Image (cartoon, rainbow, N blue to C red):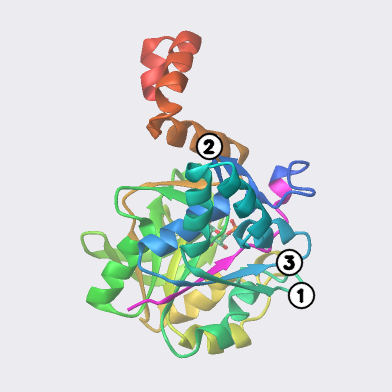
Amino acid sequence: MIRKAVIPAAGYGTRLLLLTKSLPKEMLPIVDRPVIQYVVEEAAAAGIQDVLIIISRGKRAIEEHFDRHPELEALLTTKGRTAELESLHRLSSMARIHFDWQQTLRGLGDAVAYARDHVGREPFAVLLGDTVVRSTVPATLQLTNMHKLHGGAMVALEEVPSDKVSRYGVIRGLSADGRLYRIDGLQEKPPPEAAPSNLAVAGRYVLTPDIFDVLERTTPGRNDEIQLTDALNELAETGRLKGVRIDGRRYDIGSRLDWLQANIDLALERPDVGPGLRGYLTTLLGPGDATDA
Ligand code: G1P
């Protein structure tokens, strides 16, 4: 059983500047909550009660979001604002949240390595803090369910158009059984002509503690950073890594278009703002286009 999750949330978010100069990209709003809250909710929905968020300088807003705020709670109680009070209580009881600070931004692999002592000798989930997945069964639960059946380290996979492979880690592998893949190798952000497939690593992982030894000897790769993908490649080459094609829609919040689409798609599903937004989009675009949105 997977009891712990690690959420790397230390990166600068340079693709979203100037928006992210003082606001962590993980704190960008999607409808009524910051991105990072969706990510923690997804971990909690997979039964994970212990979450370690790896942050860095300038990410204090993430800590404050998950911290209790007794004065605000007292004020809401006095004013009888029960709905807001309940949402604050839900937020603080979702999971036990811990923080650690990546000292220098040396890459995703380095960020995950910070979790070694916290995680100990058990398998754990990794959820990228800038990735939200909209799905019927939460993406992390899809992975942990598969882990329960087959064991071992696993990465979530998503098919992407070939002009997008250069943004992601891409696997070389074969479908083993339905959504389950055997992975023989991985490449971080390959050019389309060199990509081994169009199956991209989708920001969710179940890792086994042997990854920490591998990360320790992983040398800087692409962008001169310690790449998690390079460490995973070592597992793959020795037959220790599987992939799970996730059923759902992934939003990479580091991309402006994905962030805007996440807001529209998730708002359309909400009973409070959905009908109003749908009406507005229909007026703006005409009935056919609004339905597609
Ligand atoms: C990271 C990983 C990459 C993965 C991607 C998913 O890249 O290194 O393998 O496919 O997340 O979003 P980043 O987006 O941090 O550049």
Whether 119 is drawn above or below 244: the answer is below
Determine the residue positioned at 54% across, 53% down.
Answer: 88
Q: Earlier in the sequence, mark 2 or mark 3?
A: 2
Residue 168 point in image, percent of width and height: 53, 56
Q: Whole-Å distance between the Cαs marked 2 and 3?
A: 25 Å
Whether 261 is drawn above or below 116: the answer is above
Ligand 1 is found in the corner quadrant, namely: bottom right
Q: Whole-Å distance between the Cαs marked 2 and 1?
A: 32 Å
**In terms of secondary structure, where does tag 1 sit?**
loop
Residue at the disc numbered 3: 56
Magenta highlight range:
1-15
Q: Whole-Å distance between the Cαs marked 1 and 3?
A: 7 Å
Determine the residue positioned at 79% across, 49% down.
Answer: 22
**In terms of secondary structure, where does tag 2 sit?**
loop
Q: Earlier in the sequence, mark 1 or mark 3?
A: 3
Residue at the disc numbered 1: 103
Of tags 2 and 1, the one toward the viewer is 2
Mark 1 CB in 8 Å range of ligand 1? no
Residue at the disc numbered 2: 31
- The three-letter amino acid code for the residue at tag 1 is Gln
